[in-house]
Image (cartoon, helix red, strand yellow):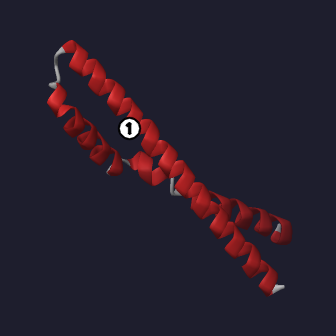
């Protein structure tokens, strides 16, 4: 019984790790695209020099790395374990 639980736990952790990586990469690419579009708009308006475009994007990505949104993606690991624990508790002890 304990080996089955451990096997399921390891498989779940691997699946959640893959999901975390995919969501993380997707979120970063969406943010970068938005920054690129914002930079292009600012260049067209004349409020940003074309030579400063890369710096604008890198500064925006650095701000994204420090943002809470990036950290919220880590809930991919926490939420399934909380739900499984709650269902197990309610099934066995309630």
Q: Is residue 75 visible?
A: no
* Total residue callouts: 1
Asked which secondary structure carries label 1, the reply is: helix
**How far across and down, in percent of the image, does residue 25 sit?**
49, 49
In what quadrant of the picture does the N terminus appear?
bottom right
Q: Is residue 24 above or below residue 51?
A: below
| Residue located 29% across and 45% down the image | 63
Say which of 15 and 77 sits in front: 15
**How far across and down, in percent of the image, does residue 75 sit?**
55, 56
In what quadrant of the picture does the C terminus appear?
bottom right
Q: Residue furthest top?
A: 45
Q: Is residue 52 visible?
A: yes
* Picture quadrant of residue 79: bottom right
**How far across and down, in percent of the image, does residue 36 sit?**
33, 30
Q: Residue furthest front?
A: 51
Relative horizontal placement of residue 77, taking residue 58 as reference (left or right) = right
| Residue located 53% across and 56% down the image | 21
Q: Residue furthest bottom?
A: 2
Say which of 94 and 91 sits in front: 91
| Residue located 71% across and 67% down the image | 85
The residue singled out by tag 1 in the image is 32
**How far across and down, in percent of the image, does residue 28 sit?**
43, 44
At label 1, counting other C-alpha atoms closer than 10 Å, the crowd grade (few under 14, some 14-19, many 20 or more) is some
């Amino acid at each position: 019984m304990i080996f089955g639980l451990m096997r399921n736990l390891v498989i779940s952790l691997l699946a959640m790790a893959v999901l975390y990586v995919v969501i993380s990469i997707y979120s970063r690419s969406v943010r970068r695209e938005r920054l690129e579009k914002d930079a292009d708009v600012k260049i067209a308006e004349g409020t940003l020099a074309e030579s400063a475009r890369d710096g604008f994007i890198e500064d925006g990505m650095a701000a994204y790395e420090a943002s809470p949104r990036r950290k919220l993606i880590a809930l991919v690991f926490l939420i399934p374990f909380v739900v499984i624990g709650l269902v197990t508790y309610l099934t066995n002890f309630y």
